[in-house]
Image (cartoon, rainbow, N blue to C red):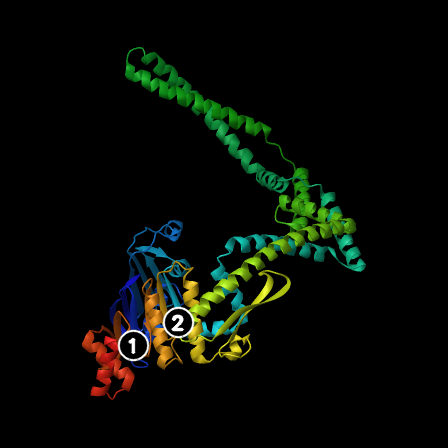
Amino acid sequence: MLSLLHIENIAVIESADISFDQGFNVLTGETGAGKSIVIDAISAILGERAYRDMIRTGTNKASVRAVFTEVPKLKWFADNGVEYDPETVIQREIHLDGKNVCRVNGSLVSVSILRKLGIQLINIHGQHDSASLFDEDNHLTFLDAFADNEALRADYSEKYEAVAKLRREIDRMTMDEGEKLRRMETLKYQIAEIEKADLEAGEDEALEERRKILQNAEKLSNGMDTAVECLYGGDESDGAAGLLAQAEYALARLAKFSDNFAAMHERVADLMYQVQDAAEEVRDARDELSYSADELEQIESRLDVIHKLRRKYGVTCEDILAYLDKAKKELDDIEFADDHLERLKKNLKKAEKAAWEAAKELRKNRKETAESMSARILTELAQLDMPRVQFACEFTETDLTANGADTVAFYMSANAGEALKPMSKVASGGELARIMLAMKNVLAEKDQVNTLIFDEVDTGVSGRAAQKVAEKLRAVAEHKQVLCVTHLPQLAALANTHLLIAKSERNGRTFTSVTPLDLEGRKKELARIIGGTNITETTLKSAEEMLKA
């Protein structure tokens, strides 16, 4: 769970330490006091996008630090080389230059990597989630999330991709006769051009190396002559090999008289043999060195041929030869296209049959899941004072698509006697808020995330319905940590922990504070929510009665 949040220099919050408890935590305050800033700060440490505009005016950076306790040993830690600790600390700095610095338990991580951890720690449900329920494109995703059918979807995806691949291949092979003839002529010309060159793998590198030798042959010859003379000696001087031979002979005689000279003799003898070997190698290389202007001209001509092929078909001889093989295969495919197309179509039929079987298994799973999910949602809605609501998942069969062979739309009727219609056409704002809460609660049963945040999801709810929403959130908080930003006294009264977000002004600057409320503080805040700024004995008494109830 999220136990501590430290915020520095985010918007109007200069510095704030917020402690959260297990159970039901609510945040209340005047509109514009900064409740959304707290949610933005939590989003930042979950790896969501953070903007420079968040940074408090006059400062260079903003920072957020969160402490999570009782964190399970998630695979994420091992995958990303981060030390696991059940008390996990996440820090994020947002700089004016756009740089973000993220750390988990002291280890630097990227924002994208942090996001993968964040979604396993907290789920944030906001007003925009209600809008997503209107969008029928999302309904299949909601259903699959409840179905827990990853294995079936993976099996179908594999079979569908085989179908899509064969279809693409058939489309590629299907061309009109004119296009076919033009492509065949092009391929034949390219094949003939490459084959005429009679290339060998690595030939270009070998020729370039030989060209370098021929271009520098005179320098090589002079250098090797000098080296041979230095090693073997000449008319006026002894070479290194001869001098070392004399030294070796002298030390061999001295070695009879002292072990020290024996060691010296061994070292000099080794040097003598090495120099003699080197001298022979240099002499042989000099003797083997041969060059002519004709050979250089032939190499330049050959490299020119290879260079022209390089510009068309690849960087190296290996690339050009690989292109040759590819062109031959394509030409063969086109020349025998009818036979090849026939084979592809037979394979496509088999692949489509397998994909349809997988799609039907997925459809069966989804329809079974739809029944159980609908029943669970209706139970939740009854608890949220909507006992007469009807809810159903309407299936439409389609051709094979990336998501299966179905589309799903959520239909409902909010009133008795009314026919089921698409949810977007029948739900009012207050009803939609409760439907969203019901669905989130049902989906949360399949979710391992321990902290849920509800950001003003009670919009449009009041009276008895508000009380039911409050009781539902309190019930959810018996199993998960719940944080709720609200304007409803019914929700605030049922909280285990009540935090007040307040805004003040000092020296021409705006400051936001976050204060945990005791019993008296909660009474005053509930009275403010009930009666506005005009707090009376009556509103205070009402607040006290709500807290006692």
Query: Alpha-carbon distance for marks 1 and 2?
Result: 25 Å
Q: Residues within 10 Å of mark 1 (few under 14, many from 20)?
A: many
Numbered circle sitting on residue 177: none
Q: Nearer the viewer, mark 1 or mark 2?
A: 2
Q: Point out residue 107 in the picture as x, y percentages from the top left corner.
A: 33, 54
Residue at the image point whose x is 30% and y is 72% from the top: 26
Q: Nearer the viewer, residue 434 or 273?
A: 434
Whether 296 is drawn above or below 539: the answer is: above
Find disc 1 in the rendering and name its residue. 28
Residue at the image point whose x is 58% and y is 41% from the top: 212
Residue type of the residue flagged with mark 2: Gln
Q: Point out residue 51 in the picture as x, y percentages from the top left corner.
A: 38, 71
Q: Nearer the viewer, residue 20 or 441?
A: 441
Picture quarter with the C terminus: bottom left
Residue 332 in sight in this render: yes
Q: Nearer the viewer, residue 417 or 523?
A: 417
Q: Which residue is the extreme one toward the top? A: 256
Picture quarter with the N terminus: bottom left
Q: Point out residue 162 in the picture as x, y percentages from the top left corner.
A: 63, 52
Left or right of 412 on screen, residue 355: right
Residue at the image point whose x is 59% and y is 28% from the top: 288
Picture quadrant of residue 460: bottom left
Mark 1 element type: strand
Residue type of the residue flagged with mark 1: Thr
Find disc 2 in the rendering and name its residue. 383
